[in-house]
Image (spheres, rainbow, N blue to C red):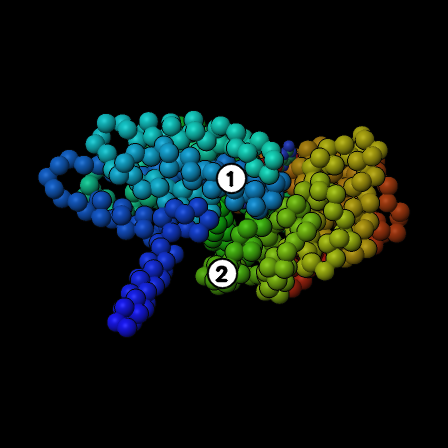
């Protein structure tokens, strides 16, 4: 029976062919959306840019990123998030032209490769995508309205390598996000080097009025828009995955600056606080990078404090807890920013290696005028002291607030009363004089909400602890004794 073996052989051959095709498909396509993956895009982009057929060709790349995708995942769940991504892919495919490649580049980011002829068709494509994506999407029995931001970069074939063009489109996407999202931005030379720098805000010892620490705050001077607030560009950087790079730059710059200050005036050692996002803490390799930055700059780990938003610590996952413990084991302090705003209690934070609480300025605002705010601050302080935590009061603007805080035993404060964030050069003159006259405290009656016991015991800041460790060049012990008398 010749037919049977022939049939079996055919089946085996076709089975092998099918499985090879399946493997190739799986290696080149994204499972969720069915779109070509990043590897395919990079390959096609490189080939497109390398074309040399005498025709004046151009290649445009459009980065399309969902706005606030994290919010969709958090509020509707990951399955709905996946459905939104699938629908986004379908719609963008319908907008694309023949010859375009729509690929899933990663997360909620799709990239369209659009070969064109310099007739502005890439702008029309971007407009079509914005309009298409604004129509409601039906997910999990609901109508959801989403938006996307689009970053566009274009070049002539052979003019730039693929990775340059992609970086330019990514920079343009960042600009679209920080201009308010749901819009298109084209790459231009002015966007290439956004002026990112760091200012420093003094933190003072309420007993001596002297500077004992600084908080590093990122600043971005945009060539057209002027100074952009970090409350705008930090969320934008988070949205398009640039937060890691931004925070690494801030951390490295601030640590190098601290090392320079300490070298220039060894007698006035003080601490540095740097804000970090939860994603950064959890990112693989962050702890090693932090160690490398400390090694490179020679900054003592105990003079650095990383500050995390309270929201990140209400329900921390396992990776976060592990990373926090490794950081603390290195000697670096960890602080909670805006403490009290997320209704977390210290009891809930038990088990986390957090040593410092930063009382949110919304509570400081009503200190000594609103009895409720005074009660909140005093209870945060008493619980913090009882649990051996250090406290920094944020946003102190008026002398009576400083007086009330000092009266309650709070050792360190920060705010416009002592100084706004300034350039690093402006910190140097502040080292030689008190930023605030503590005698003024005596003229203002202290709130005295706490029992005398805590006030008598006084409160040692983590800065005192640091100074003890380093060798107390600023006389931390003397200060602590003074406060207790
Ligand atoms: P934050 O960490 O709460 O920083 C304090 C903010 O309050 C700063 O605003 C500062 O200029 C302002 N401020 C200081 N003293 C006073 C005061 O007495 N009264 C009032 N009303 N405001 C005061 P800024 O510089 O605009 O920073 C805003 C936020 O941006 C920061 O809030 C922080 O959450 C974030 N941020 C800044 N740099 C970074 C960074 O490098 N990484 C991360 N993840 N976030 C950053
Ligand atoms: Ca902060």
Q: Which mark is residue 84?
A: 1
Q: Position of residue 327 (x, y in %)?
A: 59, 61
**Quadrant for the N terminus in the image:** bottom left
Q: Which mark is residue 285?
A: 2
- Classed neighbour count for the residue bearing mark 1: other residues with Cα under 10 Å, few (<14), some (14–19), many (≥20): many
Q: Residue at x 46, y 34 (%)?
A: 148
Dots 1 and 2: beta carbons under 8 Å? no
Q: Residue at x 51, y 39 (%)?
A: 84
Q: Residue at x 43, y 29 (%)?
A: 132
**Tag count in the figure?**
2
Residue closest to the eye, 410 or 42: 42
Q: Position of residue 343 (x, y in %)?
A: 74, 43
Residue 406 in view (yes/no): yes
Residue 52 sits in quarter? top left
Q: Residue at x 56, y 54 (%)?
A: 281
Residue closest to the eye, 339 or 52: 52
Give the CA separation, mark 1 to mark 2.
31 Å
Residue closest to the eye, 276 or 159: 159
Task: Judge left or right: residue 180 versus residue 8.
Answer: right
Label 1 vs label 2, nearer the camera: 1
């Amino acid at each position: 029976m010749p037919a049977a073996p022939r049939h079996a052989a055919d089946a085996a051959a076709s089975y092998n062919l099918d499985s090879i095709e399946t493997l190739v498909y799986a290696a080149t396509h994204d499972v969720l959306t069915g779109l070509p993956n990043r590897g395919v895009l990079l390959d096609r982009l490189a080939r497109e840019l390398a074309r040399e057929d005498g025709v004046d060709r151009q290649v445009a790349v459009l980065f399309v990123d969902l706005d606030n995708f994290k919010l969709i995942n958090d509020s509707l769940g990951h399955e709905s998030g996946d459905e939104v991504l699938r629908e986004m892919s379908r719609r963008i495919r319908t907008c694309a032209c023949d010859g375009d490649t729509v690929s899933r580049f990663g997360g909620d980011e799709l990239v369209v490769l659009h070969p064109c002829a310099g007739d502005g068709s890439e702008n029309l494509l971007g407009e079509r995508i914005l309009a298409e994506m604004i129509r409601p999407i039906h997910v999990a029995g609901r109508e959801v309205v989403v938006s996307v931001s689009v970053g566009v970069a274009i070049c002539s074939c052979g003019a730039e390598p693929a990775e340059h063009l992609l970086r330019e489109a990514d920079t343009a996407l960042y600009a679209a996000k920080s201009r308010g999202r749901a819009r298109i931005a084209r790459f231009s030379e002015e966007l290439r080097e956004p002026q990112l720098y760091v200012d420093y805000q003094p933190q003072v010892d309420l007993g001596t009025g002297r500077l004992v620490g600084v908080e590093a705050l990122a600043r971005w001077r945009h060539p057209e828009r002027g100074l952009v607030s970090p409350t705008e560009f930090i969320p934008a950087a988070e949205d398009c995955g640039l937060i890691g790079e931004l925070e690494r730059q801030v951390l490295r710059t601030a640590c190098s600056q601290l090392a320079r200050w300490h070298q220039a005036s060894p007698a006035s050692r003080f601490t540095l606080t740097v804000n970090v996002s939860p994603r950064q803490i959890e990112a693989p390799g962050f702890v090693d990078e932090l160690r490398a930055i400390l090694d490179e700059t020679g900054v003592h780990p105990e003079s650095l404090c990383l500050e995390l938003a309270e929201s990140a610590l209400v329900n921390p996952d396992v990776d976060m807890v592990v990373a926090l413990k490794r950081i603390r084991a290195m000697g670096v302090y960890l602080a909670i920013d805006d403490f009290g705003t997320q209704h977390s209690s210290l009891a809930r934070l038990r088990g986390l290696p957090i040593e410092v609480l930063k009382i949110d300025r919304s509570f400081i605002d009503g200190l000594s005028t609103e009895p409720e705010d005074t009660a909140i601050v005093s209870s945060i302080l008493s619980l913090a002291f009882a649990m051996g935590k250090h406290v920094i009061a944020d946003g102190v603007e008026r002398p009576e607030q400083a007086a009330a805080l000092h009266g309650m035993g709070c050792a360190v404060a920060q705010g416009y009363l002592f100084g706004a964030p300034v350039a690093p050069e402006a910190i140097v003159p502040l080292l030689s004089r008190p930023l605030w006259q503590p005698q003024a405290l005596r003229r203002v009656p202290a709130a005295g909400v706490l029992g005398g016991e805590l006030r008598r015991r006084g409160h040692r800041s983590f800065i005192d602890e640091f100074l003890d460790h380093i060798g107390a060049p600023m006389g931390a012990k003397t200060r602590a004794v003074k406060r207790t008398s």
